[in-house]
Image: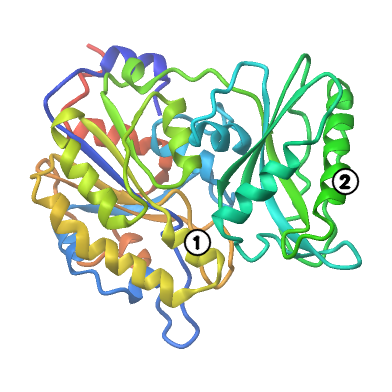
Amino acid sequence: MLPLEDFKKLAKKTSTKVVLLVVDGLGGLPHPDTGKTELETAQTPNLDRLAREGLCGLIDPVSPGITPGSAPGHLALFGYDPLRFRIGRGVLEALGIGFELRYGDLAARGNFCTVDEQGLVADRRAGRIPQEKCVELCQKLSQISLPGVELFVLPVREHRFALVLRGDNLSPDLPDTDPQVTGLPPRTLTPLSPQAESTVRLVNEFLARAREILADSHPANMVLLRGFSTLPHLPPMSEVFKLNPAAIAAYPMYRGLAKLVGMKVLESGQKIEEEFETLKMHYPEHDYFYLHVKGTDSAGEDGDFERKVRIIEEVDALLPRVLSLNLDVLLVTGDHSTPAALRAHSWHPVPILLHSRWCLPDEVSEFGERACARGGLGRFPAVEVMPLALAHALKLDKFGA
């Protein structure tokens, strides 16, 4: 992909519009009984029609063989090289719930979790406790006092919270305490650089106090932290790509990521149908829309193949509401794969569909992993999705003489 500095020279304002529909964790693996993935199993007449009329392929969010987190997967789709621009989960969680982060604040994403009598993680998400319980526990942890810093414990959703420390000389060079699997104890915090030693002491003190406070709370009797980070500097999409972008996302982290790249975050409901209605309502106001569907990723992480299929089918059934807007450019893809068989993000490439009036259609007749592998777009890095979108929207000038 060209450097962002070149896009500042090539990009131009036009009246055409781009919609990027991100079905989180879209890619999957075959079910042992049918040999079909979640996407291949789902009944998707609208996506299949778009596949016949458009171009299909596979994308690698970061690089072949690399399992991406949600942040790098999305950054690539937005046109920002995830190897150059690295953003911690903590910053995204805090921004996503509207917390006003300051430069120098240290943020981490937290999970309330369940540990057994031996101190081993039995459930990384504490049974996805209800929101009101999360708020209650965050209020308790907010009473913790640490020397020399201001502490914020902010409820996000279900088992998720954000931890923010505000003070001088805080370092993000800390590892995650989340082991990412059950049956192991939370990881011990050790500094990743000499500059982080004092920060590690502060966070370890917070963890010790949290363990005491939550000891009698079930199932949420401990916390896991990951994604220690500070606020980065990213050039906004309006400056680089000459766009007036907007984001529609129910989950806070994705709203936070959208804010970081300069999108206006539109208020919407939690249901997929409500998100689609928000797009229709605001369609005249912006020329680039990021529309995020979370449920597919959650279903994959829970190992629920059938639920992931149902959510894909719900998205397909709602597509006519968007297509009625006579879109100039529509892209449908995911930020990564989350096969139910693995119950986690994976390194597998992600199907992508590009539909525009300027397409030379390939011979793909359905939207699925193996069909997309035969598509005209081939297999390519996700960071090149944005140039393709801009080109099909006639938003790029010629490069060179």
Residue located at (59% from left, 61% from top): 344
Q: Which mark is residue 188?
A: 2
Residue located at (40% from left, 31% from top): 79
Relative to residue 37, is residue 189 depicted above or below? above
x, y (%) of residue 244? 26, 24
Residue located at (46% from left, 88% from top): 33
Q: Residues within 10 Å of mark 1 (few under 14, many from 20)?
A: some
Image quadrant for the C terminus?
A: top left
Q: Nearer the viewer, residue 66 or 300?
A: 300
Q: Residues within 10 Å of mark 2 (few under 14, many from 20)?
A: few
The figure's colour scheme reads rainbow
Relative to residue 352, is residue 108 depicted above or below? above
277 left or right of 39 in image:
left
Residues at marks 1 and 2 touching, judged by CB atoms closer than 8 Å = no
Disc nearer the start of the sequence (1/2): 2
Image quadrant for the N terminus?
A: top left
Q: Which residue is mark 1?
A: 298
Q: Secondary structure at mark 1?
A: helix
Quote the CA–CA distance across marks 1 and 2.
Answer: 27 Å
Q: Secondary structure at mark 2?
A: loop
